[in-house]
Image (cartoon, grey):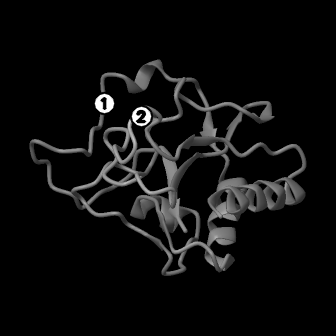
C-alpha cells in the first residue's frame, strides 16, 4: 500500500509539474527488521516513509537533486519553539550547513505534495516543521509538527499510511 501511495504521489506531482521526480529517502533500515535508521523512532513497520524536498537552483527545478548527498541534514532554517536540551534527536549540525549545495526549496512542488497528502485517504499523517507548514500553506490537520523529542522535519517530509 505504501508503494502504491508513493507511486500515486509521484505521478500526480509530475502531472502538475512536468519532469518532477519524487525521491524516497528512507522507509526502513535495510539490515535488521524492526530497527529504524537513526535518528528515526519509527520507520519499522512498512507504513512510514521520508521523501526529499523538491529543490530549485537559479536555473530552475533540479530533478533528482537534494542539498546534501543523502537528502538529510540540510535544514530549511526557521523559528522553533523547541527548547535546546541534551541529549536530543533534533540535531542542528550548524557546522555542516555551509557545505551543502546552493539550492532553494521549490515551494510550489513541495506545497503541492503537502496538499496531495491532505487529500489522499490512505495518508494518516505528515510531519514537517511548523515554520514550513505555515510558509507552504499546509493547514490540513494531517500535516503537523512531530514534537520536540523527534528528529527535525525541515530537511524532508515524513508521512505514514
Residue at the top extreme, as displayed: 99
Could you tell whether 53 is left or right of 99 in the image?
A: right
Q: Is 20 rendered above or below residue 108?
A: above
Callouts 1 and 2 close, C-beta under 8 Å: yes
Residue at the front extreme, as displayed: 33
Q: Residue at x 71, y 46 (%)?
A: 22
Q: Position of residue 29 (x, y in %)?
A: 43, 38
Residue indicated by mark 1: 93
Q: Position of residue 111 (x, y in %)?
A: 65, 62
Could you tell whether 139 is left or right of 21 in the image?
A: left
Mark sitting earlier along the chain (1/2): 2
Relative to the observer, which residue lies in front, 97 or 114? 114
Q: Residue at x 28, y 54 (%)?
A: 150
Residue at the left extreme, as displayed: 86
Residue 16's disc is none
Spatial CA distance of label 1 from label 2 is 7 Å
The picture quadrant where one finds residue 82 is bottom left
Q: Is 33 rendered above or below residue 62?
A: below
**Mark 2 element type:** loop
Q: Residue at x 53, y 78 (%)?
A: 139
Q: Position of residue 63 (x, y in %)?
A: 76, 35
Q: Residue at x 31, y 41 (%)?
A: 39
Circle 2 packing at 10 Å, graded few (<14), some (14-19), many (20+), is many
Circle 1 packing at 10 Å, graded few (<14), some (14-19), many (20+), is few
**In the rendered view of the protein, which quadrant contains the C terminus?**
bottom right
Residue indicated by mark 2: 73
**In the rendered view of the protein, which quadrant contains the N terminus?**
bottom right
**Mark 1 element type:** loop
Q: Is 142 rendered above or below residue 96?
A: below
The picture quadrant where one finds residue 24 is top right
Amino acid at each position: 500500500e505504501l508503494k502504491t501511495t508513493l507511486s500515486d504521489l509521484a505521478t500526480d506531482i509530475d502531472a502538475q509539474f512536468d519532469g518532477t521526480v519524487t525521491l524516497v529517502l528512507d522507509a526502513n533500515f535495510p539490515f535488521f527488521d524492526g530497527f529504524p535508521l537513526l535518528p528515526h523512532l519509527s520507520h519499522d513497520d512498512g507504513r512510514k516513509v521520508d521523501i526529499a524536498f523538491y529543490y530549485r537552483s537559479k536555473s530552475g527545478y533540479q530533478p533528482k537533486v537534494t542539498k546534501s548527498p543523502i537528502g538529510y541534514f540540510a535544514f530549511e532554517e526557521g523559528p522553533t519553539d523547541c527548547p535546546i536540551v541534551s541529549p536530543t534527536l533534533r540535531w542542528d549540525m550548524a557546522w555542516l550547513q555551509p557545505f551543502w549545495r546552493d539550492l532553494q526549496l521549490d515551494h510550489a512542488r513541495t506545497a503541492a505534495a503537502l496538499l496531495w497528502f491532505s487529500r489522499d485517504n490512505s495518508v494518516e499523517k505528515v510531519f514537517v516543521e511548523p515554520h514550513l507548514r505555515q510558509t507552504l500553506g499546509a493547514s490540513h490537520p494531517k500535516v503537523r509538527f512531530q514534537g520536540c523529542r523527534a528528529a527535525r522535519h525541515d530537511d524532508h517530509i515524513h508521512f505514514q499510511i
